[in-house]
Amino acid sequence: MSGENLSTLILLGSFLLMVFLRFPIAYSVGISTALCLISMGQNLSVLPMQMVKGVWSFSLMAVPFFITMGVLMGSGGISDKLIALANSLVGWMRGGLAMVNIVASYFFGGISGSASADTASLGSILIPMMVDQGYDADFSTAVTITSSCEGLLVPPSHNMVIYATTAGGISVGALFMAGYLPGALLAASLMVGSYIISVKRNYPKGEKFSLSGFFKQLGTSFWALAAILIVIVGVVGGVFTATESAAIAVLYSLFVSVFIYKGLNWKGVWNALESCIDTLAIVLILISLSGAFGYCLTNLHVPAKAAAMITGVSSSPIVIALLLNLILLVLGMIMDMAPIILIATPILLPVAQSIGISPIQFGIMVVLNCGIGLLTPPVGAVLFIGSAVAKRPMEKVVKATLPFYLCMLITLLLLTFIPQISLWLPSLFGYAV
């Protein structure tokens, strides 16, 4: 075995072994990188140097701001407003509260950008409300956790920023615009699944649709929804960079949460910022360590070898695209979202581009695959949160989620084989796709 192959085996083998042994993912990445550098005969001082290089990016400054914005808005009393808005829009349908859950997640995801925050915030309100109105508890939880993945696609998603930085040279604004239609498609797919189940189980309808009631709730929710406009209009219109818009959105969300909705006092703001620091510490450590991990991958020519191996299985673009999705889905079952984006993107993106998949389209595919992974055992963080919020056994929630997995997989296939779903809006606004 050559020295390069041995180092590759040490890097990937030790990493996967530690993941399966349930090491914290940051330790898995860091230790495997250190072992690889030793096997390559390089000085371990390369590790901290590459860690610093991994976070030395202006675009990455948007990540802390978007996370802070989501936590402030999520803690600031906007959940009730968005639920009321969604109810005025789709509550009249059969299984109305399930539809409300899905649409509210689309609105809330555009503010928090976090599936976990969506599940914890909206789930704590909507799951008990659905159960009180006769919905099955496991069905209610399944709707909540699957619809929370809409927030990963709908901007401003900090995971999109991480992908853009990792992929290199991709416009954050283009990725933001690319997420709207896939997020809406996912919502529509989940609503169809919910409607079929609701009809079979005769779940209740809500009140009849009222145009005046909708506009009234829209006026109440305007301040929350305006945070999205600041980011999207600012970035797409070229007024701000993604980082600048995120910083302005943090100040805006602080003002709205404290002075308009009054869901936060200054003590609550402090507690929210403490929560942000916990999240940011994890995210930034992972990004920095993944920079060093990526350095080893590049020096060992792993992306080129992986591309050759995958394309060697078949020359069919359809088969290769399915293989890429399968790899990402399997990774999602054993790893969290940020590490997958950071580690898998440099390896799989060249393969995707070789069969004509745009980096922007591939970013949407990666994020949705990772979102599905958040709902699958054994490392499904959103699945765990949903089970905890609903106080339901995880295995029963998984069983109730099976029809929704199918809806999500159909959406994933549509996004894979119909590029314009992801690329139409960015191209409409003049981005290179």
Image: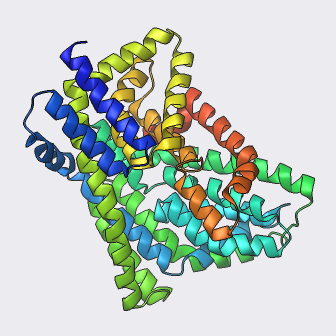
Rendered image quadrant of residue 431: top left
The answer to whether residue 178 is above or below residue 304 is: below
User: Which residue lies at the image location 19% right of the left edge and 40% below the top edge?
Assistant: 34
As rendered, which of 358 and 203 lies closer to the eye?
Answer: 203
Q: Position of residue 165 (x, y in %)?
A: 29, 44
Colouring used for the render: rainbow
Q: What number of labels is visible?
A: 0
Side (left or right) of 394 relative to 360 = right
Closer to the camera in the image, 257 or 310: 310
Quadrant position of the N terminus in the picture: top left
Residue 117, compared with residue 11, is above or below; it is below
Provide residue 146's location: percent of width, then percent of height: 64, 53
Extreme residue toward the front, this view = 21
Q: Position of residue 44 (x, y in %)?
A: 10, 41
Q: Looking at the rendering, which quadrant does residue 88 occupy?
A: bottom right
| Residue 431 appears in the picture as rendered | no
Can residue 97 be seen from the camera position used here? Answer: yes
Is residue 182 found left or right of 348 in the rendered image? Answer: right
User: Which residue occupies the foreground of this view, 368 or 92?
Assistant: 368
- The residue that appears at 42% across and 75% down in the rendered structure is 72
Q: The C terminus is located in which quarter? A: top left
Q: Quadrant of residue 171?
A: top left
Q: Residue 215, position in %: x, y?
A: 66, 74
When the figure is inspected, residue 340 is found, relative to residue 142, above or below; the finding is above
Q: Is 191 situated left or right of 235 in this image?
A: right
- Please say if 83 is above or below 417: below
Residue shown at 40%/21% (left/top)?
A: 351
